[in-house]
Amino acid sequence: MSQNTRPPGPPRGTAPSTATTGWRGAGREITIAALLVAAVTAAAWALAGPAAAGFTALSCAAASFIALRALIEPHEPPPAAYLSQEMGPSLIFFGFWRTRSDLSDAIRSLSAWDNALCPRLTNLLAARLAERHGISLAADPEAARRVLTEGRQDRNELWDWIDPQRQTPQNAGSLPGIPRSVLAALIDRLERL
C-alpha cells in the first residue's frame, strides 16, 4: 500500500463509531460501580464486622436494582390495529347495528339525537366544510349555514337541527327526536356537501 492511499474507514481525526446496544457500552460504568460497592463493603467490614459488610452489600444491591429499574424504559404494547383495515365481520356487523340503533333512537327521542347522533353528524359537517370548502364550523357558523342550506329557505330546517349553538331543552327525554324526513335530507346533504 502506498503512502497516499489509506484503508477504507472513517476520515482522519475522527474516532470510529463505538455505538453499541444493551449493556456492552456500559462496561466502564459497571466496573466503577462494582469497585465502589467493594470499597464500601470493605470499609463496613473494617469498621463494624462481617454483619455490617453483608448488610452493606445487600443494601448496595437493592439500591442498584432500584436505580436500574428507573433507567429501564417501560414496555409499551404494540399499537392497536387500525380498525378500518383490520375490521373482521363481527366488528362490521356490530358497527352496522349500532349505527342503525343510533338512527332509530334519534328519531324517537330528542335526547338521543342531542347526545349521540347530532355530535357525530356535526363532526362530519365540520370535516366536510373544512376539507372541501375551507370553512371552519366553529369560527364561522354563518358561512357554514349558507353552504349547508345553499341559501335555500326550504333547507333552513336542516341547519336548525345540526346547529352547534342549538340548546337542548330540559325535557328532551320526553320529546320526539328529529323527523325521519329531515334526518334523511340532512344525511343526503352531508353526503353531497
Image: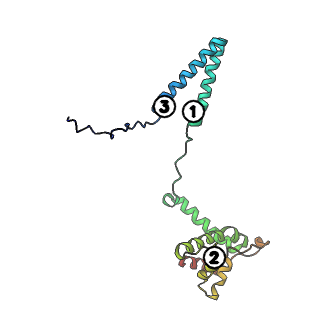
Crowding around mark 2 (Cα neighbors within 10 Å: few <14, some 14 to 19, many 20+) is: few
Depth check, mark 1 against mark 3: the one in front is: 3
Q: Earlier in the sequence, mark 2 or mark 3?
A: 3
The amino acid sitting under disc 1 is Leu
Check disc 3 and report its element: helix, strand or loop: helix
Work out whether 87 lies above or below 34.
below
User: In the drawing, does residue 96 fall left or right of residue 156?
Assistant: left
Q: Picture coordinates of residue 97 (x, y %)?
A: 60, 65
User: In the drawing, does residue 113 fall left or right of residue 129?
Assistant: right
User: In the drawing, does residue 187 fall left or right of residue 1?
Assistant: right
Tag of residue 140: 2
Question: Mark 1 near mark 3, Cβ–Cβ under 8 Å?
Answer: no
Reading the image, the residue beneath label 3 is 26
Q: Picture coordinates of residue 24 (x, y %)?
A: 45, 31
Out of 117 and 134, give the one closest to the viewer.
134
Q: Please say which color scheme the image uses.
A: rainbow
Check disc 1 and report its element: helix, strand or loop: helix
Which of the 4 quarters of the picture holds residue 63? top right
Crowding around mark 1 (Cα neighbors within 10 Å: few <14, some 14 to 19, many 20+) is: few
Residue found at x 58% / y 63%: 95
The amino acid sitting under disc 2 is Asp
Q: Residue furthest left?
A: 2
Q: Picture coordinates of residue 131 (x, y %)?
A: 53, 72
Residue found at x 75% / y 72%: 168
Question: Mark 2 near mark 1, Cβ–Cβ under 8 Å?
Answer: no
Q: Picture coordinates of residue 152 (x, y %)?
A: 61, 88
Work out whether 122 lies above or below 10.
below
Crowding around mark 3 (Cα neighbors within 10 Å: few <14, some 14 to 19, many 20+) is: few
Reading the image, the residue beneath label 1 is 68
Which of the 4 quarters of the picture holds residue 162? bottom right
In the rendered image, the quadrant that contains the N terminus is top left
The amino acid sitting under disc 3 is Ala
